[in-house]
Image (tube, rainbow, N blue to C red):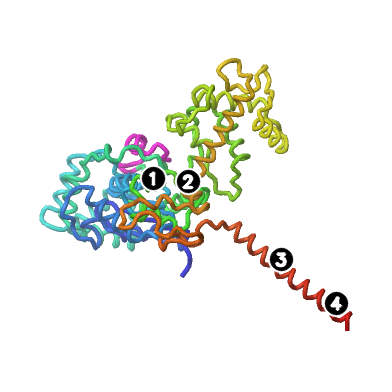
Amino acid sequence: MTAVDGTIFFLPGLGFGAAAAEPIADALGDRFRVVGIDLPGQGQAPDAPDATVGAMVDAALTRIETESDGGPWLLVAHSMGGKVGALLAARVLSGRANVSGLAGAVLLAPSPPTPEPMDDDKRSEMLGWAQHGSLSETDARTFLDQNVASPLGDTREQDALAQVQSTSPLSWRRWLETGSREDVSATVGVLDLPVVVLAGEDDADLGAAAQPQLLSAVYPRARFVPFPGTGHLLPYERPDEVAAEIVRLWNETVLVSPGLSPEWGRLIASDRTPVETRGLLAWRALADHPDYQSTALSLAQLEMLRALADLLVPQTDGRRIDLAARIDADLASGSGDGWRPAGLPDDVSAYRRGLDAIARAWPDSAADREHLIRRILEGEPIGGGGGADTGTGTGAGTDSDQMKRWFEDLRTDLARTWVAHPATMARLGFDGFATSGAVAEPGYVNLGAGVRDPWEPAGLGRLETEDAFAAEESVAADQAVAADRAVAAEESEESA
């Protein structure tokens, strides 16, 4: 079986089931595992007893929790699935789901968390189609014609028609009468995760012109992509372009962020991890915004902080945490560690002044920069022009000791932010986050040196670099033994 990069979970729109993911899956090829989900009353799924959107979320999460392998995944949601997907993502990111690894979402003409904009006459017409049972072929064809900009082609049209006609009339009416009118925005809140919103320019209600106004406040990181000459049925009308955007989002998030092995992902998703902790780890694992805009610091100060982070916490594997951006966000929200060295101003002021002072003295060469850091650590003046050698004090800013103490605080913030990332925890072999969840035996049972509990990940606390070092040591030892034997053989021959 060919290994895949990750999983795509697909939530369909009204009238469609898991099979609507097939055109996108074909366009993606074998790089991803695509799991289409039948929402209640659609595809092969029975109707739900509850008519709310929350019942759809329950059904979708049950499938995702079953199918997830602990690795990274993207959510792809079309139309009605967009409202379901917003609630689903909110649950995952709050830790109220036994799943980890959500990296972002690709939304296709999504229904918003607020009541869906729909013309009253159109709603009445669609309700009439299911008044006496499943949609007829004529009504199903009318539905398709109203939602595409141009004919789909025989194969795709027949597939789409079959799905629409197989939809439960009860689920059809429930969505039009109740689900589409639900306002779940307060429950969803703000989802600051990587998102791409795709929509057709020929879509009357949920098209490219409407989506920014509907979703910008919900998804502040969303990138909106309009498709000319396209209606509402993007999975059938533009599967190749949808697949390309899925790949692009994957490359911009999963491939540039520190990753977790599926085993660690499953541990985070398990009941051993408390709900609140699972939610925090889900947020921390998200890729940093590539165009992050600083809020507490100026752009120049943010770049200076990034340069210091690169020097003090090297990340050389190509998958990076933007430590500076995360510290800036903490400074802006006041959610730091609550510690302030004596004699220093508030954290934001101290950071601004300290970074400005270092920037004025920042040399060009790597060796000189390391030398500058050593001088700060030893409490020596660093200069920087203007007669100030630190810029962090409450007075004229000439106290090198204040710079030293602020810099200790900075190093603590960098280390704390780096260690807080779940990938770093896995790298260091720390699984203490999974010791107080809702399980019969929380905590550790085996406390002996070198002894692990059965639930702990394999290779705990052993870095790949350690494996490589051990291999090198083994080769060196073999070479040494061979050399000793050769010398012994030569000495034996000489004696003879």
Left or right placement of residue 300 versus residue 277 in this view: right
For the question of whether residue 204 can be seen, the reply is no
Position of 449 relative to 328 (above/below): below
What residue is pinned by disc 2? 421
| Location of residue 356 in the rendering, given as x and y in whole percent from the top left corner | 60, 25
Left or right placement of residue 78 versus residue 140 in this view: right
- Sequence-wise, the earlier of marks 1 and 4 is 1
What residue is pinned by disc 3? 476
- Residue extending farthest top: 396
Q: Mark 1–mark 2 contact, CB under 8 Å?
A: no
Magenta part of the chain: 202-223
Give the structural element (helix, strand or loop) at label 3. helix
Residue 239 falls in which quadrant of the image? bottom left
- Distance between the Cα atoms at labels 3 and 1? 56 Å
Pair 3/1: label in front: 3
Give the structural element (helix, strand or loop) at label 2. loop
For residue 198, the mark is 1
> Residue type at mark 1?
Leu
- Sequence-wise, the earlier of marks 4 and 3 is 3
- Sequence-wise, the earlier of marks 4 and 2 is 2
> Residue type at mark 4?
Glu
| Location of residue 124 in the rendering, given as x and y in whole percent from the top left corner | 15, 44
| Location of residue 31 in the rendering, given as x and y in whole percent from the top left corner | 47, 60
Q: Residues within 10 Å of mark 4 (few under 14, many from 20)?
A: few
> Residue type at mark 2?
His
For residue 179, the mark is none
What residue is pinned by disc 4? 491
Pair 4/2: label in front: 4
Image point 36% across, 40% down: which residue? 191
Q: Residues within 10 Å of mark 2 (few under 14, many from 20)?
A: many
- Distance between the Cα atoms at labels 4 and 3? 22 Å
Front in this rendered view, residue 473 or 367: 473
